[in-house]
Image: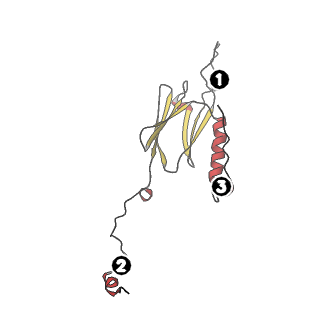
Amino acid sequence: MVTKAFSFPRSHFIGFDHVWSEIEKLSDMADNKLYPPHNVVKHDDTNYSIELAVAGYSKETLSIEVKEGILIISGDNRPTLGKEIEKEYLHRGISSKKFTRTFRLSEHVVVDGADFKNGLLVIDLRVEIPEEKRPRQIPIGKSEKQLLTEDDDENTKVISD
């Protein structure tokens, strides 16, 4: 597979510095954050959910926070001092490491809630567009200002040759 680096002339886009910074930040986050694995599910045009596979964690060891448009999910399942049970592992494939996973949310996305069952953390998201930003139909002929009035029609003279 050949990967082409995305190169765009920034000089053609004035005032979009915050967008480029956000793209670079997301690129850096993608490189460093591969754990835990997750799914993003689209239920319909306004409802989504994020599913994280967090086997071995409990509700008490997980945290979900939204801060400045970023959804932050973290977990710390490491045994605390004095509570560690000595086990001899022949193979350790289930992770219990500390993690932080972040997702950038659009300005109109709200978190509706979360559920945890059978090692799967599901976070429900909804797109909530304010009424003033929703598309609306503009009726024709209902303008408060009249551009043409009947008086203008009567005073208009047609000059003919």
Q: Which residue is mark 1?
A: 82
- How far apart are the two marked residues, 3 and 1, measured between alpha carbons? 50 Å
Q: Give how far apart the Cα atoms at labels 2 and 3 are.
A: 45 Å
Q: Nearer the viewer, mark 2 or mark 3?
A: 2
* Kind of residue sitting beneath label 1: Gly
Mark 3 highlights which residue? 17
View extreme (front): residue: 161
Relative to 1, does residue 125 appear above or below in the rendering? below
Q: Is residue 38 left or right of residue 148?
A: right
Q: Quadrant of the C terminus?
A: bottom left
Instruction: Return the mark for residue 148.
Output: 2
| Horizontal and vertical percent position of residue 91 | 63, 14
Q: Secondary structure at mark 3?
A: helix
Location of residue 82 (image quadrant): top right
What secondary structure is found at the residue carrying circle 1?
A: loop
Give the residue drawn at x 54%, y 45%. Answer: 105
Given residues 30 and 81, the one toward you in this image is 30
